[in-house]
Image (cartoon, coloured by chain):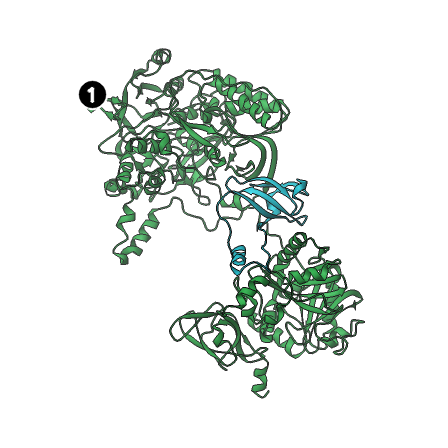
């Protein structure tokens, strides 16, 4: 059985390209250009899905990308929208949300339970007894949701694209096309987007059985095609409106972020269903849906139908249906006065009966509720929304077209901050006050007459051009007197309900009444309680009726109820679109490839990649074994770490030393050239932010290092304060320009000495000394440091020489047993040395007094960042103190973790562990913890609670920890 | 707000900028009371309205002040600190 009709002018299918696919195990024929729904409907298949809650059979409703009861899966993808997704050869489709197939869905029994499942029932029903909740939760979770997520979904890389234009026009219907042509003619660069596969909007389907609209469309499309300034993007929707006219345009291939100078929203309107019992049966659909089927896909919606309407559009629909041979039994007009004499006569001339002041009281289902058998027509009282059932008539039909009114597709207008007002003549929300640079045209602007829409497009383009500074004359659009496009209350009460308002979530009229009775009588509360508009269509076909119902319940005018703002995205958008191309820039040090080649386990360290440890292939080293071996190499011989990620900033100028004295806590004015000092940075609250080293290279030149993670922020703060303080200082960020490496351990001096002309002897180069010279034939900056070991040399060379110097040092250290070490070993090494890491062992509230850093704070300076706060803090008793601690020798219980809590005898939290590690060198567990000040002195004991709740004894201990070795007599 | 005008480089996308907090005049640390200092460090006026804010243009390393209405998210002017008169 086929409902495909003879070729229609302008149809969207390609009859030369037939194709075959499978739906629920059945072979289906279609054409290229068909959507899944159109192909199925053409083959007489009417049940396209099951509803979300009651599992009722559903067919087509809007045919405009909000038929969320017709969602398909092809095994890989899910929740494919059948009304808009194109068919392709060999597709294997099934409806989601069914058990045992769409026709025999085992869950359809839920429909019979519906009287017991009012909205909100699950909020109230399942919370007690509490012990049963997991059982119910499992059931509800299984019942809820639509398609099943495919966890093996392939990763599809989506591009990140950007576009710019003068005028972005959303919607390529009559108004949008007209606006585009007018703006482009004045030389403006226009992007015109439409979510349909072809431009035209309602011109491509709302024909009323005539040719005029199609002729107009042809003229417009020819003009657009001839215009070089217009870029037309179809099959793409504007996902949302963001500040400064940034609009993401979503295509199947990904998102293009369009930055426009001005935006014209000509997105049109969504047709809204009248509400009557069983308005959800397959075969009952919106008038515009039947027109789309007819003109775009050449499919007859049904053989014998009725049109129920509350505006003139129903008459136009009837004429379109009659033009393709559908027997239209009657136009049932809910308006007491009906349509104009002229329009009524046109319909009557086609042999269609017109019943004014009538409604469909209910649709009568066929067996299994899989379709319509007949409709019950009654006189309708527009004031009370009641049908007079004493005078009912039954009309046999297999389909119903519904046209009751429209709601603006105004999501982007709302998002842009448009103040919408309710127009009582149109019975529609229209833009009241538009934000700067945003314009509206066409039906979304309340202009329905075709000629007027074309004028409105020109008017909007003119205003947009004026906004862009081009003086063009703007003609106001004269209002055209016409019948009201929307009915103020297209609802038919029915004692048995099942008169659906929201098809996504199966919400009936009585659900709103109940919600209001429960006190949820504000639109935002009602939305959340009933979940109206919260389904996948986001209220596109339901919010307007919900507002009308709530207005009537509260006996308020519609504008007093207000609307909810539909948030981005306009249609569901794949996460992969939002993610776009995986774009995580990494910085590689000069020695990166060497690390990789030598088994470095590379880890993220901010934007850098650093080796955590080295486990060359075939070495069989576990992570912890590698770390201990690397650590021991440093303690017993020599090791080397790539420290290129350190922030490296040069500070020049007459005020360089004075600047550093204001910026950091230490003193630098009296610092000797060739020496280094700790550079500790606080914020204004006196909290420790960073610690690095400042080297004085010359009177007016300092070389400052920062922690790797703070390189960018410290540089930025320096820049700000140079400007704020008006000092004569120039900053150069050398972080990426210089490679750095630290050679550490008792043998480090002999290794470095073989490669440098600098005298690195203990006498010539004490701890903290800085020397410039050659290392492996390269200009280098060499510093004696003691962060990871008592004897260590930090060598800075230009980035390009980094690998050469690194390799030379590795080679020179071979006989001494040099080992590269990673960040994990570095952490353990500095812990053994008793050095805390700022922002690892300290947090966003730690001041220097709490972290044994008093000596670094020169309170006798006139000013430094944080000083004034420290003066206040110094007057107060300390609340906590960072201390080094050890666990008992031979401890082998559950090891405390970082962030485990310190608990006192009264079971109070008094501190926490910030670092903890086993040191093979010391054969002890050592760490840092915050404890009350009275427990911070060496020898004090405290208890740490582990993850499992066990208590572990710890003892505060002096740092560095090496005295533990002496006490063992080693 | 998705665009911001750097006083040196002109209008650039917001992704190039870093917010640097509200601009506040520091009280004289030598003469102000502890309470005044604590208020300066810790209190921020949360009410929406016209604010002076620090912004940083990353690619060029430019700090500047933006006068922004946090209610409407509109920036009325931007200038380098201390060069307010030039704008």
Q: Nearer the viewer, residue A14 or A353?
A: A353
Give the letter of the cyan chain.
Answer: B
Q: Colour of chain A?
A: green
Q: Can you say which quadrant of the picture contains the N terminus of chain A?
A: top left
Q: Relative to B20, is A537 on the left or the right? A: left
Residue under the image location 57 percent in, 46 percent down: B52
Q: Nearer the viewer, residue A170 or A505?
A: A170
Q: Relative to A434, is A42 on the left or the right? A: left
Q: Quadrant location of residue A946?
A: bottom left
Q: Can you say which quadrant of the picture contains the C terminus of chain A?
A: bottom right
Residue under the image location 61 percent in, 32 percent down: A165
Q: Which residue is mark 1?
A: A391
User: 10 Å neighbourhood of mark 1: few (<14), some, or many (≥20)?
Assistant: few
Residue under the image location 54 percent in, 58 percent down: B37
Image location (x, y in percent) of residue A274: 33, 28
Please indicate, yes or no, whether residue A841 appears anywhere in the rendered image: no
Please indicate, yes or no, whether residue A921 appears anywhere in the rendered image: yes
Q: Nearer the viewer, residue A773 or A342?
A: A773
Image location (x, y in percent) of residue A286: 37, 27
Chain that bears disc 1: A
Mark 1 element type: helix
Residue lying furthest front: B31
Image location (x, y in percent) of residue A28: 42, 33
Question: Image height check: is A518 above or below A493?
Answer: below
Question: Image height check: is A432 above or below A781?
Answer: above
Residue lying furthest bottom: A969
Image location (x, y in percent) of residue A674: 75, 69
Residue lying furthest left: A390
């Amino acid at each position: 059985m086929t409902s495909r009709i003879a070729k229609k002018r302008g149809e969207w299918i390609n009859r030369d390209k037939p194709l075959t696919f499978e739906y629920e195990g059945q072979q289906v024929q279609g054409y290229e250009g068909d959507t899944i729904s159109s192909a199925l409907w053409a083959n007489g298949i009417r049940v396209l899905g099951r509803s979300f809650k009651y599992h009722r059979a559903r067919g087509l409703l809007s045919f405009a990308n909000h038929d969320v009861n017709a969602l398909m899966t092809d095994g890989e993808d899910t929740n494919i929208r059948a009304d808009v997704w194109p068919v392709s050869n060999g597709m294997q489709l099934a409806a989601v949300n069914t058990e045992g197939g769409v026709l025999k869905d085992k869950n359809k029994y839920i429909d019979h339970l519906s009287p017991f499942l009012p909205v909100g029932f699950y909020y109230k029903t399942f919370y007690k007894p509490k012990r049963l909740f997991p059982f119910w939760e499992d059931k509800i979770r299984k019942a809820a949701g639509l398609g099943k997520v495919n966890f093996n979904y392939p990763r599809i890389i989506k591009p990140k694209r950007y576009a710019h234009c003068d005028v972005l026009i959303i919607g390529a219907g009559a108004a949008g096309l007209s606006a585009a042509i007018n703006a482009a003619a004045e030389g403006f660069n226009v992007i015109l987007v439409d979510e349909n596969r072809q431009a035209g909007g309602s011109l491509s389907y709302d024909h009323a059985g005539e040719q005029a609209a199609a002729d107009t469309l042809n003229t417009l499309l020819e003009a657009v095609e001839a215009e070089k300034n217009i870029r037309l993007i179809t099959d793409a929707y504007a996902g949302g409106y963001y500040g400064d006219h940034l609009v993401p345009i979503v295509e199947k291939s990904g998102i293009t972020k369009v930055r426009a100078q001005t935006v014209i929203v000509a997105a049109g309107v969504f047709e809204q269903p009248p509400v009557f019992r069983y308005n959800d049966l397959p075969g009952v659909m919106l008038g515009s849906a039947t027109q789309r089927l007819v003109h775009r896909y050449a499919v007859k919606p049904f053989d014998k139908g009725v049109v129920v309407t509350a505006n003139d559009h129903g008459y136009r629909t009837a004429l379109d249906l009659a033009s393709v041979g559908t027997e239209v039994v009657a136009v049932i007009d809910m308006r007491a006065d009906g349509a104009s004499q002229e329009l009524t006569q046109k319909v009557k001339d086609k042999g269609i009966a017109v019943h004014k002041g009538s409604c469909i009281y209910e649709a009568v289902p066929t067996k299994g509720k899989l379709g319509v058998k007949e409709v019950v027509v009654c006189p309708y009282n527009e004031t009370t929304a009641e049908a007079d059932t004493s005078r009912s008539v039954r009309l046999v039909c297999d389909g119903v077209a519904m046209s009751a009114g429209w709601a603006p597709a105004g999501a982007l207008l709302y998002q842009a901050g448009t103040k919408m007002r309710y127009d009582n003549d149109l019975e529609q929300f229209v833009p009241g006050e538009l934000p700067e640079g945003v314009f509206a045209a066409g039906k979304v602007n309340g202009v329905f007459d075709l000629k007027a829409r074309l004028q409105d497009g020109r008017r909007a383009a003119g205003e947009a051009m004026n906004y862009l500074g081009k003086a063009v004359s703007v003609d106001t659009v004269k209002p055209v007197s016409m019948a009201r496009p929307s009915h103020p209350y297209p609802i038919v009460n029915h004692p048995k309900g099942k008169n659906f308002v929201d098809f996504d979530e199966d919400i009936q009229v009585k659900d709103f009444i109940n919600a209001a009775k429960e006190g949820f009588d504000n639109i935002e509360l009602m939305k959340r309680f009933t979940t109206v508009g919260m389904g996948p269509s986001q209220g596109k076909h339901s919010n307007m009726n919900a507002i009308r119902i709530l207005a009537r319940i509260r006996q308020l005018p519609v504008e007093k109820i207000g609307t909810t703002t539909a948030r981005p995205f306009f249609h569901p958008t794949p996460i992969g679109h939002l993610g776009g191309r995986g774009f995580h820039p990494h910085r590689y040090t000069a020695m990166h490839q060497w690390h990789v080649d030598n088994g470095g386990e590379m880890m993220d360290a901010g934007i850098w990649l650093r080796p955590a440890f080295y486990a060359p292939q075939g070495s069989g080293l576990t992570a912890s074994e590698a770390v201990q071996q690397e650590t021991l190499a440093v303690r017993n011989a020599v090791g080397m770490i790539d420290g290129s990620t350190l922030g490296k900033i040069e500070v020049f100028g007459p005020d360089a030393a004075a600047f550093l004295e204001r910026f950091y806590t230490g003193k630098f004015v009296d610092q000797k050239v060739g020496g280094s000092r700790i550079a500790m940075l606080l914020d204004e609250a006196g909290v420790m932010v960073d610690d690095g080293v400042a080297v004085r290279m010359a009177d007016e030149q300092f070389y400052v290092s920062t922690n790797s993670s703070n390189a960018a922020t410290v540089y930025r703060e320096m820049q700000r304060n140079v400007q704020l303080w008006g000092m004569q200082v120039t900053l150069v960020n050398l972080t990426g320009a210089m490679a750095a490496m630290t050679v550490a351990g008792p043998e480090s001096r002999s290794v470095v000495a073989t490669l440098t002309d600098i005298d690195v002897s203990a006498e010539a180069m004490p701890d903290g000394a800085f020397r410039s010279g050659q290392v492996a034939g390269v200009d280098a900056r060499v510093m004696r440091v003691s962060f990871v070991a008592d004897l260590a040399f930090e060598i800075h060379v230009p980035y390009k020489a980094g690998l050469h110097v690194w390799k030379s040092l590795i080679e020179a250290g071979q006989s001494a047993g040099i080992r590269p070490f990673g960040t994990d070993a570095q952490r353990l090494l500095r812990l053994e040395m008793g050095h805390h890491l700022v922002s690892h062992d300290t947090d966003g509230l730690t001041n220097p007094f709490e972290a044994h850093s008093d000596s670094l704070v020169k309170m006798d300076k006139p000013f430094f960042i944080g000083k004034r706060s420290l003066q206040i803090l110094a007057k107060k008793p300390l609340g906590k103190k960072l201390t080094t601690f050890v666990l008992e020798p031979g401890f082998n219980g559950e090891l405390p973790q970082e962030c485990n809590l310190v608990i006192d005898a009264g079971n109070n939290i008094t501190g926490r562990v910030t670092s903890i590690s086993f040191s093979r060198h010391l054969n002890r567990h050592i760490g840092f913890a915050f404890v009350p000040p009275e427990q911070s002195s060496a020898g004090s004991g405290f208890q740490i609670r582990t993850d499992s709740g066990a208590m572990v004894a710890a003892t505060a201990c002096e740092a560095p920890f090496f005295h533990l070795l002496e006490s063992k007599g080693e | 707000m998705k665009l911001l005008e750097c006083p040196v480089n002109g209008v650039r996308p917001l992704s190039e900028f870093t917010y640097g907090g509200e601009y506040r005049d520091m009280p004289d640390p030598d003469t102000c009371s502890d309470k005044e200092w604590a208020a300066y460090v810790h209190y921020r006026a949360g009410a929406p309205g016209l604010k002076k804010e620090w912004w940083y243009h990353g690619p060029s390393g430019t700090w500047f002040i933006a006068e922004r209405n946090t209610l409407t998210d509109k920036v009325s002017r931007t200038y380098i600190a201390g060069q307010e008169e030039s704008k």
